[in-house]
Amino acid sequence: MVFWFGTSNRTEPMSVPNPVWITEQFVRLSCFLGLREFEMRGLSNHRLSCCVNTLLQTLNATWELADILEKWKPAGGRAEDNVPFQLKRVLKMMQEDLPHPAPHQDFLHCLDRNRIRLSTQHDADEVFLSILDFIQLQMDERTLALEIQSLYKISVETQVQCLQCNNVQTRNSHLLSLPLHIKEDRNSLKDCMISFFEQQELRGIDCCFCAQCEAKTPTKQGVKLCSLPQILCIQLKRFRNIHGFTHKLNCRVTFPEKINFSELQRETFSSGFTQNDCRYILYAVVVHSGGAMFGHYTAYVRHRVNHRWFYADDSRVSHSSWEDVQKTDGSSYRGTAYMLMYRKDPKEVDQLPDLSG
C-alpha cells in the first residue's frame, strides 16, 4: 500500500513504515518524554517454559543481580552453553521498554543443554537453586560469582545435643532459600519461621550418632540464624509425599508485605548474630496453580521505580495491587504463593505505607 502526500508534482509514492517500527519509535519517544507505557516485558511460553518465565521475572526484579552481571566481562568459551552469560543477555533485553515479549529462547535452550529440559514440568525452587549453582560453576570471575551468592546467602548454625551426655555438636552452613514446612491448616509466615527454628527431639530410627557416647542416642536438634542476606528467598513447602504419592497442600499461608526478623524469638539467632536492621519488604511472589503433577506458574513483581505491583503470566503482563498479591495465600480459588522474595532495604521500608498482612 502507498500514499500520495501534498499537491506537488511528486511522481514517486511514499511507502508506509513497518507497524512494529512505528511502535518501537513511539515507545522510545515516550521514554524520552518521561512516559512509560510499557513498564514490563512478558515472555512467551515456549515448550512448557512457564516455570522459567516466572523465575526470569523475579530475577529481573532483583536489580542487584542484574547490576553484578553487567559488571562481568566473560573471557570467552562456549557462550551458548553458559547460563550466567545467557541470563545476563535476557535480563538486559527484559529491561527494554518494548511492547512485545522479550526473546528468551537462547536462555531456554542453554538451560536445556545444562539438563533443565524443555517440554518438562519443573519445580520452581529447584530451577531457581540450579540457576544459582550454574552461576557459581560457570562464571569465570570468582569475585563477582561470590558476590551474587552473597545476595542470597543465609548463614545458619545447626546444633545437635545428645540427651544422654548433653554433648553439643555444632556445624555452620548456608542456604540460598529458606524451606518452610507448612501445616495442613491455616498458617502464617511468622508461625512457619518459628517452627523452622525451634528445636526438635529425634528418637528411635531418627537418633543421631554421639561422638562422646560412641553410639546413636536420642538427640535434640535445632537451627539458628548466623546472618541474613540482602535478598531473602522463602519456599513454602506445599508439595508433600504421602504413601508414595506427591500431593499439593492448598491450605492458607498468610504473609506480610513487610517483615522484621528482630521481632522473632531470641532463640532463633546464634550468639554471633550481630545484624541490627532485619527489616525486609516483599518484592516478588512465585505463584503455582494446579496440582502436584501438573500446573502453571505466574509471578507478581514490584516495579523498581514506582513500586507498583505487576502480574506476569507468560507474555501477558498487567497492573496489579497488594490486595491481589494477598489473595494468593490460599484463601481463594486461585493460584497459591509458592516462593516469596524479600529485599532488605530500610529506606524503602520507611517510605512505603504500612500494608502488612
Image (cartoon, rainbow, N blue to C red):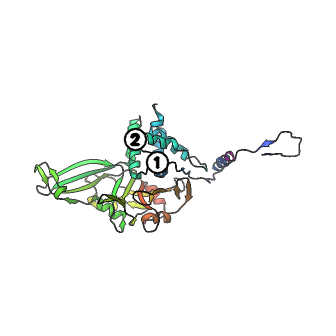
Q: Residues within 10 Å of mark 2 (few under 14, many from 20)?
A: some
The span picked out in magenta is 17-22
Distance of label 1 from label 2 (alpha carbons): 20 Å
Query: How many marks overall?
Result: 2
From the viewer's perspective, tell me whether residue 286 is left or right of residue 212. Answer: right
Residue 235 percent coordinates (x, y): 37, 56
Residue 76 percent coordinates (x, y): 46, 31
User: Residue 172, relative to residue 347: is it above or below?
Assistant: above
For residue 25, the mark is none
Q: Main secondary structure of the magenta part?
A: helix
For residue 119, the mark is 1
Inspect this view and state whether residue 354 appears.
no
Q: Residue at x 38, y 56 (%)?
A: 234
- Closer to the camera, 236 or 204? 204
- The residue labelled by disc 2 is 134
- For the C terminus, the image quarter is bottom left
Image quadrant where residue 336 sits: bottom left
Q: Residues within 10 Å of mark 1 (few under 14, many from 20)?
A: few
Q: Amino acid at mark 2?
A: Phe
Asked if the magenta segment contains residue 292, the reply would be: no
Q: Residue at x 32, y 65 (%)?
A: 183
SS under mark 2: helix
